[in-house]
Image (cartoon, grey):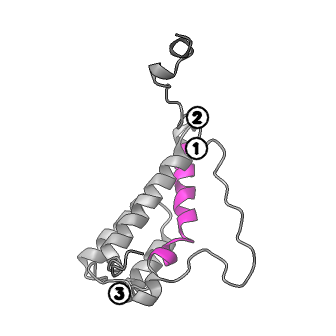
Amino acid sequence: MRGEPPPPSPTLAQALAAARRHLGLWSDWDGRAHSSPEAEARARQQAVLKMRKLWPLYLMGFASAAQLRGQLLAASSLAEVDAAIEGSALAGGHDPLERCGEDAARAVRLKSTDGRPPQKVALPDGWLEGRLEVAAPDYMSDAAAEG
């Protein structure tokens, strides 16, 4: 909007790092507050399974990631995801410096383009709990206002 050229499209390494961070955060969110280690492990596995729908979106436009995409879609644990990414890199299965094609970088993801209204976005239950518990500064207290 300032008349500058757009930044370069991300590299495959950057896309994988963002996707892996997304998965880690999702796994931490789903795995929190469980009463047993088994329940926590099941919740973390569910995060990996839910991430399957997003891997193709993160890897869209990277020709060298086709085999890796298949491995990630078959993964059922965080360890399998990490092994697929590291194994593919070590075996030369993908080019981490490959840049996403411009068409793919600008592609609409997870949004309707057929004229339907967008889906309502909502935060998961409990998402904001404890996140906004910041004490007001002293100068905003009732006593300070009184005097």
SS of the residue under disc 1: helix
Looking at the picture, how far across and down is residue 135, in whole percent?
49, 25
Label 1, residues with CA under 10 Å away: few <14, some 14-19, many ≥20: some
Task: Quadrant for residue 129, please give it.
Answer: top right
Residue 25 located left or right of residue 36:
left
Judge depth for marks 3 and 2 and give the one in front: 3
Q: Which mark is residue 64?
A: 3
Residue 125 located left or right of residue 1:
right
Tell which residue pokes out farthest to the right in this image.
Answer: 116
SS of the residue under disc 2: loop
Looking at the picture, how far across and down is residue 56, in whole percent?
50, 78
Q: Nearer the viewer, residue 92 or 101?
A: 101
Residue 108 located left or right of residue 81:
right
Task: Answer whether residue 116 is visible to the viewer in this image.
Answer: yes
Task: Quadrant for residue 115, please give it.
Answer: bottom right
Task: Answer whether residue 84 is visible to the viewer in this image.
Answer: no
**Residue 42 lies in the magenta stretch:** yes
Identify the amino acid type marked 3: Ser
Identify the amino acid type marked 1: Ala
For label 2, the residue is 35
Q: Which mark is residue 110?
A: none
The magenta span reads: 40-58
SS of the residue under disc 3: helix
User: Going from the N terminus, do you reach mark 3 or mark 2 first?
Assistant: 2
For label 1, the residue is 39
Q: Please report the residue visible at 56 percent of the width from the left and 12 percent of the height from the top.
A: 146
User: Decide: marks 1, 2 in contact (CB < 8 A)?
Assistant: yes
Mark 3–mark 2 distance (CA, rounded to whole Å): 42 Å
